[in-house]
Image (cartoon, helix red, strand yellow):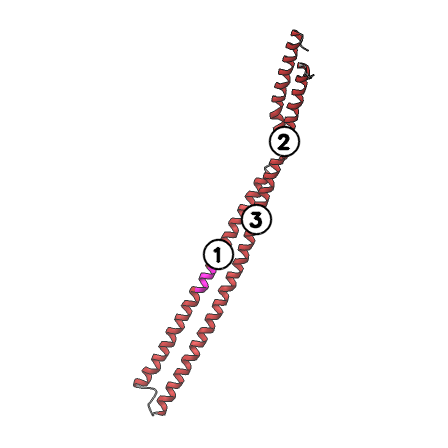
Amino acid sequence: MATFLTPAQASQLGGIFAIGGAIQGAIGSYFNAKSQALQLESQSSSLAFQADMSRLNAVQAEFTAQQIMRAGNLKQGQVSLRAGKIKSSQRASLAARGIDLGVGSAVETIATTDLMKEIDMLTVNSETVRSAEAARLQRQNYLTQAAIQDVSAENVMASSRTISPSMAATTSLLGSASSVANAWYQDRKLAAMAAKLGLD
């Protein structure tokens, strides 16, 4: 034979379920808020790491710029040395043929060599400065990127600090309290009606 609950028993059971649901909702709210805070902290750590990597890249870009400048200085030295050898060979050749080095085409030949050397030196310098400045511009881009990532990391961390799992659980309980009270009131009303009808 099947056993049924009396209205009073059903009323008590409904109240217990309502309280259990409220507690379960509060626990869910707590862990949901905790999870959100941890996700934001993780995102902040990732942004801080990216900022550190950008700073390292900036250091590398400056090192590259300095290497470019050193290589450019070396290349200018090589251009000057080569021009000096050419000029010496020209003087020796002209002198061996008995040509006066201070007049006419001899002066023009040596002046042309000096001019070509100067043009080559300026070209090397221009290329060196352009390349070094491109590396320095990249360095500045990395530093700007790092600054933006630092600010983003701080903002995300500040957002994570505004999340309170305890407050979320409390808010959930308070929100559920009206539902529990309403269920209790309805159960009491139902129990009173059942008593009047003699169904308890």
Q: Residue at (65%, 23%) from the top-left corner? A: 17
In the image, is residue 189 above or below residue 110? above
Q: Quadrant of residue 81?
A: bottom left
Residue 131 against residue 153 in the figure, above or below: below
Residue 109's x, y, as percent?
33, 82
Q: Residues within 10 Å of mark 2 (few under 14, many from 20)?
A: many
Which residue is label 2 attached to? 169
Q: Secondary structure at mark 1?
A: helix
Q: What secondary structure characterizes most of the magenta part? A: helix
Instruction: Name which residue lies at 49% across and 52% down.
Output: 144
The disc labelled 3 sits on which kind of residue? Ser
Q: Which residues are magenta?
A: 131-136
Q: Quadrant of the C terminus?
A: top right
* Residue underneath mark 3: 46
Of the image marks 3 and 2, the number of the one nearer the N terminus: 3
Q: Quadrant of residue 25?
A: top right
Circle 1 is placed at which residue position? 140
